Structure formats: C-alpha cells, structure tokens
Amino acid sequence: MKMKECLMVVFFLVFLLGFNSNLSIAASPDPEKVSAQEIITRSDQVRNPAKPFRMMSQLIEYDGGVARNELTLIIFSKEDKELGQYKTLVRYIEPLRDFGKLVLMNGSQMWFFDPSSKASVRISPQQRLIGQASEGDVVTVNLATDYKAELLGTETLDDADRKPKICWHLDLAPARDDTIYSRVEYWVEQGTFYPVKGKFYADSGRLLKIAYYHRYKEQLDTKRPGEVIIIDAVNTRQVTTMNFSDYRYQEIPEAWFQREFLPHLKIE
C-alpha cells in the first residue's frame, strides 16, 4: 500500500471511538427526561474506556462483497483531561510493507510518520485511509465535546443484524471549528446508550457515509461495539468493516504523543 493510500484510513477510527467510560454506565434515566447532550455523553462512554488503553483494529474494504484491501492497526489512546479530548497514536501492523508507520493525533493536529524516511508530515483527518474509512475514523473522539446535540425524536430502526431497536434520533452540529464532519445524524438505543447508526456529512451538506455499530461484547469492564460497518453513501456496493479486539488498559508515556519523539519511538 502506497503512503498516500495509507494516509486515508486512520480518522474514522478516531471518530468511531468515543469517550470516558467508567465501566458502570449508570442506571438508565427516564427516556423522556434525558437531555440530548447527556445521551451523547453516555454513548461516548460505551465506546471508549476512561483509562489509557490500547486495542487492535482490522479494516477490510469490500466492493460488491469481494474483499479488496486489508489493514491491521494497533491504537493507543489517552484522554487529555485539560482539553476533554483524546490523544491517539496509531501503529500500522499489516500489510508488512506498511509495518511501523504511525499516525499521531494530538489536539486538532494529525501527523503521519514513515520510518523509511524518518519524516513526519501534517495530514488531514479527512484523508482516505482504506475504503470508506478516513484517517479521522480510526482515532478516538469525544462526540460530546466536539458537537452540540439536538434530539429529533424517538424512532424504531433495524440495526446491522436487522433487529428492531428503539432509538433516540439526534442531530449533531459542530461545537468547534476543527471537527471531522460538519454534521452527524446519530441513533442511540434507549436503555443501553449503545450507538446503533450514524450518518456523516461533508461541509457541502452531502452525505458521505453511513455507519452501523454492532457485535457488542465485553471489553474492559463493559460491552462495546466489536465491529463498525461503513457504507459509501453514493455506491452502496462499497463497504468497509472495522473490527476491534484485544482491548487492554495500558500506561502510555506522554512522549508517545509528541511529534518530535516519533523517530525514537520503540513499541514492543
């Protein structure tokens, strides 16, 4: 995979992963009384552990049901308590030709590092990583910090397994200038706060992609989505799956999130 192609997968991971979770997601409030912003906060807690962690992500791009490309990453994330956002380091594992490449997200800045040149270049979270996934999709994102949520209503919709779910339907508008998407529609299951579906829009208002969250399983003290399916909004034959596994709590040195340290980084 060429460098340009590699640059296009990492940001949907950031985006698809969410926020603080103190494992025990508190008891469900009355669906009629919970605020839109609280729904997003609780949904973030489902997606992301509260303590520094690592996990593995395997991305597969399909065209008409036929697998075309695969990519395996290890993602290290740690919350920046001051900013309320996550710092993320992504390491390429497979294919072998990409082994050791890195993507760093710290604040609103994202960098790509190639060990062959020992140089880092600034990249955009919107750059394509693989298939329908962008660099920003693979880093950990706090939606409750980045977006202002409006509750549009309650709907029953089918999840990725075609099972009906009663969901809050929310509209997310950027709360900052550097958000990855200019608008997000988001469906969160009532009672569990599990994200079920998301629709992501460009600055022009065009729908870019649709994501389904499913295969919930125990990971670091609570159930989290084990897979996200990303469907191209224009050509629905083009689909990218993102599978998450091997979650672990891990202390992560602050130096790992410094661009200047990337050439010296040694990860066992």
Image (cartoon, grey):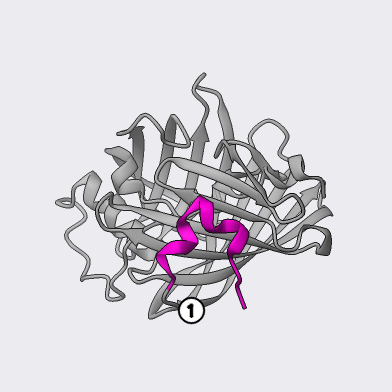
Residue 211 coordinates in the image, percent (x, y): 56, 48
For label 1, the crowd category at 10 Å Cα-Cα, with few meaning under 14, some 14 to 19 and many 20 or more, is some
Residue drawn where x is 34% and y is 57% of the image: 43
Is 259 included in the stretch rendered in magenta?
Answer: yes
The one of 124 and 70 positioned closer to us in this rendering? 124
**Residue type, mark 1 in image:** Arg
**In the rendered view, does 206 fall on the left or right side of 4?**
left
Residue ID at (34%, 41%): 146
Q: Quadrant of the C terminus?
A: bottom right
Can you tell which quarter of the image residue 264 is in?
Answer: bottom right
Q: Is residue 110 magenta?
A: no
Of residue 84 and residue 194, the one placed in the foreground of this image is: 84
| For residue 169, above or below residue 55 | above
Q: Residue furthest top?
A: 204
| Residue stretch in magenta | 252-268
The residue lying at 55 percent from left, 39 percent from top is 125
Residue 259 visible to an observer of this rendering: yes
Q: Describe residue 112's horizontal placement relative to residue 150 as left or right.
A: right
Considering depth in this image, is 6 or 27 the residue closer to the camera? 6
Q: Position of residue 100 (x, y in %)?
A: 70, 62
**Count of numbered circles in the view:** 1
Q: Which residue is mark 1?
A: 248
